[in-house]
């Protein structure tokens, strides 16, 4: 309506719709601070975008194109998508309501969801992704049971290095699946995740869904429902990534900046950047970081660390 247009704070008029969408998302979907919908929306940005294969050719899906929503009946058959069913259902009506493309909706919702997480960087957002014409091939999303070299190869086929994968995995700092989480601070985007994954344990989380493969020596934090994914653990230990991983601990600024860069690249995977317009101005400012630095959770100490990087381990409280 003309009223809305007068009130639109965008400097680029084409971005007005994303200011409206941000308001609706915050009022109806991301009502909690870094709650389950926000976390699921962040995962959705990856599960959609990684459906891209340089070796498989253009018909194998085109990355960050929203095919995970438009062709959800097909793509939800991938067991790696078992956690995103609900958020897809929640977001789908917004396609018609705001008349935007599915790829834009997925990436914008992820950016707005992340902004509710204290400690998160403000993400860039480009608009104008065309709607998808084909579903992504099944099997392109890594599984937590995959071998680390399989995961690296899959990410390389989508254009991402092992270092960029570690940076993207910062998103597992704000993650849940059923009643368990990947670090002890699941509603804060902080470096605690990179510490918690290194803590060797002996207790398994019972009843985890099949998509959740646990590390060979599962989490010492299992009594707090923190799970060590086999894939996260393997990446923390691999010689290509062990020091990248360890260096994140207590390096909040590095985590924020490197995640923002890698996530921007993820958000335009398979897209022609020259055809997109910058609507970053519509992404809300992130909730400030209120947490403390990474620290050993109660009952754990440096003796529990499975250190794979030869640089000195950071000094922690
Ligand atoms: C090696 C690659 C990865 C593997 C194997 C993996 C695996 C998983 C698994 C098993 C879950 C639990 C929920 C489910 O079963 O779907 C999960 C959740 C999540 N993943 Fe990943 N992931 C990977 C990479 C990423 C990346 C790059 C991102 C970056 C955006 C990401 C963001 C998330 C988020 C935010 C959640 C929490 C979802 C929620 O709370 O609902 N993951 N991931
Ligand atoms: Ca956290």
Image: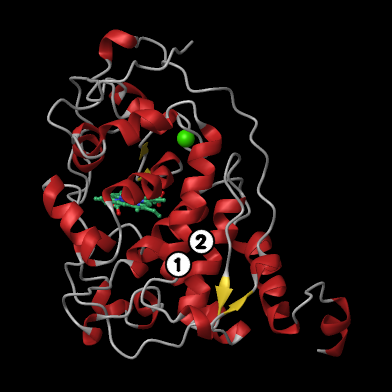
Apparent side of residue 136 relative to residue 55 in the rendered image (left or right): right
Marks 2,1: beta carbons within 8 A: yes
- The numbered disc on residue 186 is none
Mark 2 beta carbon near ligand 1 (under 8 Å): yes
Helix, strand or loop at mark 1: helix
Mark sitting earlier along the chain (2/1): 2
Q: Residue at x 20, y 48 (%)?
A: 144
Apparent side of residue 112 relative to residue 222 in the rendered image (left or right): right
Residue 225 makes an appearance in the image: no
Residue under label 1, please give it: 267
Q: Is residue 69 above or below residue 210?
A: below
Give residue 127's quadrant in the image.
bottom right
Give residue 25's quadrant in the image.
bottom right
Disc 2 packing (10 Å; few <14; some 14–19; many ≥20): many
Residue under label 2, please give it: 110
Near-viewer residue (306 or 276): 276
Please identify the quadrant where the N terminus is shown: bottom right
Apparent side of residue 47 relative to residue 120 in the rendered image (left or right): left
Helix, strand or loop at mark 2: helix
Q: Residue at x 46, y 77 (%)?
A: 103
Q: Is residue 272 above or below residue 301?
A: below
Callout in the foreground (2, 1): 1
Residue 153 makes an appearance in the image: yes
């Amino acid at each position: 309506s003309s009223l809305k247009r007068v009130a639109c704070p965008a400097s680029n008029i084409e971005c007005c719709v994303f200011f409206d969408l941000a308001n609706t998302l915050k009022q109806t979907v991301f009502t909690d601070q870094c709650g389950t919908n926000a976390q699921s929306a962040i995962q959705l940005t990856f599960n959609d975008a990684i459906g891209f294969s340089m070796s498989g050719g253009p018909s194998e899906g085109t990355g960050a194109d929203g095919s995970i929503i438009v062709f959800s009946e097909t793509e939800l058959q991938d067991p790696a998508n078992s956690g995103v069913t609900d958020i897809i259902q929640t977001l789908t009506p917004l396609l018609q309501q705001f008349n935007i493309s599915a790829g834009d909706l997925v990436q914008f919702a992820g950016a707005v969801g992340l902004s509710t997480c204290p400690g998160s960087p403000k993400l860039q957002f480009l608009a104008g992704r065309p709607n998808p014409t084909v579903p992504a091939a099944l099997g392109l999303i890594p599984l937590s049971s995959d071998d680390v070299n399989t995961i690296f190869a899959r990410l390389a086929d989508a254009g991402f290095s092992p270092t960029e994968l570690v940076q993207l995995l910062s998103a597992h700092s704000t993650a849940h699946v059923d009643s368990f989480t990947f670090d002890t601070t699941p509603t804060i985007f902080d470096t605690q995740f990179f510490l918690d994954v290194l803590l060797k344990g002996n207790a398994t989380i019972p009843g985890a869904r099949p998509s959740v493969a646990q590390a060979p020596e599962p989490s010492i934090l299992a009594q707090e429902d923190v799970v060590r994914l086999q894939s996260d653990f393997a990446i923390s230990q691999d010689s290509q990534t062990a020091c990248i991983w360890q260096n994140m601990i207590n390096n909040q600024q590095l985590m924020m900046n490197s995640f923002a860069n890698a996530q921007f690249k993820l958000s335009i995977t398979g897209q022609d950047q020259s055809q997109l317009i910058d609507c970053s101005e519509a992404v809300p400012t992130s909730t400030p970081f209120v947490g403390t630095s990474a620290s050993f959770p109660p009952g754990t100490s440096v003796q529990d660390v499975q250190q794979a990087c030869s640089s000195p381990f950071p000094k922690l409280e």
